[in-house]
Each structure stands twice: as C-alpha cells, then as structure tokens.
C-alpha cells in the first residue's frame, strides 16, 4: 500500500508500524513517530496498523538552537 | 547559578548545536565554553542515511543537560506532537517550546505558544517557552504552569542584541523569582554580558558562536564581561570579528527547516 512518509509517497508491504520501520531501514535506530500528526509511542508501534494514505512522520535527534 | 525546574545548572551559558562547521568544532565549543545545557532538535530521518544516529552519539558525549526544542513548528498541534516525540527521543520532560508565527523573522506566535504551553504542562512537560518580552504574555505563560521564561533579545540569528531593554528589565522586575533566559538575537559577548548584568539568569546562544569562526573567542571574551572588568583590546577585536560574520541577508538567517516534521512534501 502507498503511505506518505516524511512528506513523500512510499510503497510498503507491512501494515504494523513496528514492521514498517524495519522495512524502511530504521531497524533498532533511535527514532520517534507520529501518525497523521498524532504521536505514537514506541511501546504502541506493534499495536498500530496503518492504512493506505496515512501520513507517517519518522524523526531522530538532530542539531538545534 | 540558575535553577530550572529544580535542577541547578553550573553555567549561565546555554548553547545551541546547529550550524557549526563540523561535529568536532561543535564538541570543542561545548568543551571550551563549559556550557551547561545543549539545545537539540528533532528532524525527519531517512532509513538509508540515519544522520540522526551519528548526532545522537555525539551529544551523548557532551555531558550536558539536553533541552530539545520544537523549532520549525508553526501550529499548536505540530508543537505538541513534536514535543512528545522529543520527550521519547531524549528522555527528558524539558521542552524548549517554539511556535513560530512569522516565516521571515521566526517571531513566536504568542497565542499558539500560550495554548501549547498549557497543553504540554498538563501532559507533564516542563516548558521553556521561547517568547517575546511582552509582560502580559509572560504572565499568561506563568499562569499556565511555565516556571522559566525565555524572551528573545532580537529575532533569531540577527545578532542585534537586546532590542527592548525596557521590556526585558520590566520582566526581571515583575518576576524576581522566575528564572529568565535571553534566547535569540545575541551577537557578541558584550550583549550576553549585558543580559546577565540586567539580572537574567542565563543566555542561550547558537548562531553567534557557531558562526564565530573561532568559538574559543567567546570563551575568552565572556568571563571578562561577566566579571564586569573592562575589555582588553583583544576581546574587542574578537567581538568585531564575530559581529562581521553575522551580517548576512535575512534569508540566510532562517533556520534550516527542510527536514522539519509535518512539512508537506507533496
């Protein structure tokens, strides 16, 4: 299905958020997620199913002022 | 020394981590300045590049308190969601709350800021609001639970210094027991010293140090002013050099926001 990851359309085969993160190459990386502008805690990823067209944000620590 | 939400920090200097020429210079700036708090951010991460993981490894070594921000957020909803993502990533209740109201000046949206501060305080965050020096706004922020205020000296990255001395003094006078930090707009060491001499508890610097060419110049310049000793000529020369480097067009001073969450890329 097609979802929107960080503003770009992406085709994924997995449906659960934890599996999608692995499919997209994040594996054990330190990232946080939001689905359709709502925060999804790491502990909830396995219980969170995505649907086509959902908007997923994947963020990591970065430089800031 | 300043106490933020019950935590005493052994420095009046807070440093941002953006815009340094290299990770090594960033680390050196922290080591030499002895800054007590580092501001950090969250940005979109690519699974193939994983740029954030290297930065995480770097800041873990800095041995300073981390203050994540919500830079790049233009709405209450974005700021609240970003704060939650930052809390999970950095494992801290502290959040430097930015709700940007104007794309050019990065001036805070003071109405959205007060609302986001209320929501996040109720969610258990300890909010450091990036605000203007408006007295009524600051009273509102305290009312909704903020225990620190971070008024700007001038717009982000301008190096203009303390644009409204009266307003900043008014805040200090009205809130003698609230930790106050001048955030944004400081360009040279004398301006930072001026804030401390006005009774502010700390200053937050980023652009001025990161773009100084020689971050060590700040370390050499600041202690003189903070001890209220007249500047030797060397310090004055360093300050002029720093000031010249900050004179850039407005468009170049904007935050690097292309990786900010929630920007529509479609």
Image: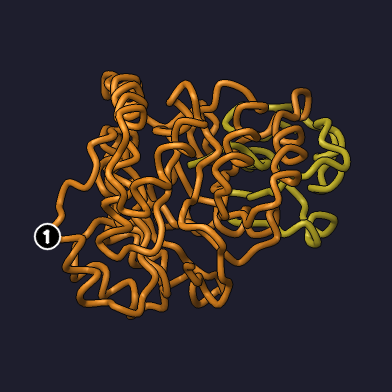
Q: Secondary structure at mark 1?
A: helix
Say few, some or many: other residues with alpha carbon within 10 Å of mark 1 (under 14 / 14 to 19 / 20 or more). Answer: few
Q: Is residue A4 visible?
A: no
Q: Is residue B151 visible?
A: yes
Q: Residue at x 78, y 44 (%)?
A: A30
- Which residue is nearer to you in this view: A37 or B199? B199
Residue placed most toward the observer, B6 or A16: B6
- B170 or B236, which lies in front? B236
- The tally of labels here is 1
Could you tell me residue B5's position as x and y percent?
52, 74
Residue B215 left/right relative to B56: left
Q: Is residue B162 left or right of residue B57?
A: left
Kindly identify the residue that appears in the image at 24 percent across and 42 percent down.
Answer: B161
Q: Which chain is orange?
A: B
Place of residue A50 in the rendered image (x, y in percent of width and height, measured from the top left):
73, 47
Q: Position of residue B173 (x, y in %)?
A: 20, 74
Residue at figure coordinates x 62%, y 35% from the top left? B44
Horizontal relation, residue B104 to residue B149: left or right: left
Callout 1: residue from which chain?
B
Is residue B154 positioned above or below B195 on the image? above
Q: Position of residue B265 (x, y in %)?
A: 51, 27
Q: Which residue is mark 1?
A: B166
User: Which chain did the renderer colour yellow?
Assistant: A
What residue is at 45 percent from the left and 38 percent from the top?
A: B206
């Amino acid at each position: 299905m097609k979802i929107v990851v960080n503003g770009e359309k992406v085709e994924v085969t997995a449906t659960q958020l934890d599996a999608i993160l692995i499919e997209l190459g994040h594996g054990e990386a330190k990232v946080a997620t939001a689905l359709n502008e709502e925060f999804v805690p790491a502990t909830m990823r396995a219980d969170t199913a995505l649907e086509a067209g959902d908007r997923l944000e994947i963020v990591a620590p970065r430089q800031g002022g | 020394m300043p106490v933020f939400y019950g935590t005493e920090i052994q420095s009046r200097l807070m440093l941002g981590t953006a815009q340094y020429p290299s990770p090594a210079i960033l680390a050196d700036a922290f080591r030499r300045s002895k800054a007590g708090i580092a501001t950090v951010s969250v940005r979109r991460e690519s699974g193939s590049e994983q740029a954030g993981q290297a930065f995480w490894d770097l800041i873990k070594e800095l041995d300073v308190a981390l203050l994540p921000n919500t830079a790049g957020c233009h709405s209450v909803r974005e700021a609240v969601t970003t704060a939650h993502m930052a809390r999970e990533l950095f494992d801290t209740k502290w959040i430097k709350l930015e709700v940007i109201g104007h794309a050019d000046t990065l001036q805070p949206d003071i109405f959205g800021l007060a609302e986001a501060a209320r929501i996040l305080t109720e969610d258990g965050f300890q909010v450091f609001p990036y605000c203007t020096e408006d007295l009524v706004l600051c009273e509102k922020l305290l009312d909704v639970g903020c225990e620190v205020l971070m008024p700007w000296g001038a717009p982000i990255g301008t190096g203009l210094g303390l644009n409204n001395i009266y307003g900043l003094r008014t805040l200090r006078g009205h809130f003698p027991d609230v930790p106050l930090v001048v955030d944004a707009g400081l360009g040279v060491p004398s301006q930072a010293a001026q804030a401390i001499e006005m009774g502010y508890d700390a200053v937050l610097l980023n652009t001025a140090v990161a773009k100084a060419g020689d971050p060590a110049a700040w370390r050499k310049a600041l202690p003189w002013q903070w001890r209220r000793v007249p500047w030797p000529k060397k310090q004055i020369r360093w300050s002029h050099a720093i000031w010249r480097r900050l004179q850039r067009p407005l468009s170049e001073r904007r935050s690097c926001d292309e990786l900010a969450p929630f920007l529509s890329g479609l």
